[in-house]
Amino acid sequence: MLRTLYLNSRQLPLRLVTTVPSGRTETLLWPASASATPGTTKQAPRLVVLMIPGNPGVADFYTRYLSSLSRRLDAASPHTAVDIYAISYLNHSAAKTTKKSVFSLAEQIQHKIEVFDYLVNVYPPDTKFVLMGHSIGAYVCECVLAARPNSNIVKIVQLFPAIMHIRDTPNGNRLWWLFTSFAGVILPLMAFMLHLVVPRWLLIKLASSSWLSGVHDVHSATIVIDRLIRCKNGTAIRNCLAMSRDEMNTLHEPNLDFYREHADRIHQYYGVQDGWVPLKYRDIVQEALAETEAAVQTCELGMPHAFCL
């Protein structure tokens, strides 16, 4: 059914809804060009990339990055078809997808395992999978691999990986108060009231001022306003804050034994100045994996942690 849906559309990414036990999942899909363009010599997709966002877990933040990746993979692999998916976290955007209101980090991880299982069942048995996670999504990728170690996951790509001691980072020390239970009640209410009294165009203009919000352009600002701020009853923001609180309480020591066990499937990418992932965290992993096949890379382009904004 997924194949039929995107064969009949040329606008990318395609917007799908993936239904798994935890709930309906907002899904973006960049299909392999062979599937979208009849008459090519490429085979049906045998490699699937699954992008798991950071927090906020909104897939739309990654459209430009994944569109570029899709084009590059097409050009670099003329005989290999690759499908790319990006999924949103449950209730992290304006489209509430379940009856349950707020989800914990553990529940969000279970949801990603269910989506992965769904994709495994959609594709032929010999299909290989790459899990790509940004920030806390990198940790979620680890959890999916840990839950399905014998699957065809050939690589997990961890971008600016928030995988340890988040509370003790510069940003964690500076912003911890945003993730308290009190803030989890007040901030969603304030955001909900804000969108009722301030015109959408003005909210986008304010959000696109990077000095004020950390967002760098109108494209990203529009996603922030439409997918987070204008969410009924502040559900999306409540979920983002609740999950952040879970992250700080959950992520402490890294699972170095896990990295050693799956070293040939690990590729980590760190920023030089990252307030959520200091380079000393990279050094811990790098030292543990020094004599393995793991790839631990440091960005030389000055990319920020929130590169997708």
Image: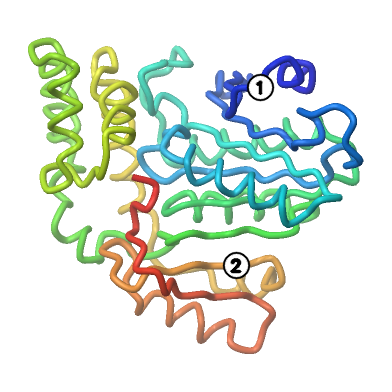
- Residue ID at (18%, 19%): 201
Q: Does dot 2 land on a helix, a strand or a loop? A: strand
Residue 281 found in image quarter: bottom left
Q: Depth-wise, is mark 1 or mark 2 nearer the camera?
A: 1
**Vertical arrangement, residue 176 with respect to residue 8, above or below:** below
Decide which of 301, 113 is in the foreground and name it: 301
- Residue ID at (30%, 66%): 274
Quadrant where the C terminus sits is top left
Can you tell which mark lies on residue 10? Answer: 1
207 sits left or right of 297 in the view: left
199 sits left or right of 30 in the view: left
**Vertical arrangement, residue 130 with respect to residue 263, above or below:** above
Residue 76 found in image quarter: bottom right
**Vertical arrangement, residue 208 with respect to residue 150, above or below:** above
**Vertical arrangement, residue 217 with respect to residue 37, above or below:** below
Label 1 and label 2: CA atoms lie apart by 32 Å
Can you tell which mark lies on residue 267? Answer: 2
Are there few (<14), some (14-19), or many (20+) residues within 10 Å of tag 2? some
Q: Does dot 1 land on a helix, a strand or a loop? A: loop
Whichever of labels 1 and 2 marks the residue nearer the N terminus, that label is 1
- Residue 241 x %, y %: 27, 37
- Residue ID at (47%, 41%): 64
Decide which of 206, 94 is in the foreground and name it: 206
- Name the amino acid type tagged 2: His
Are there few (<14), some (14-19), or many (20+) residues within 10 Å of tag 1? few
Tally of marks: 2
- Residue 250 x %, y %: 38, 54
54 sits left or right of 7 in the view: left
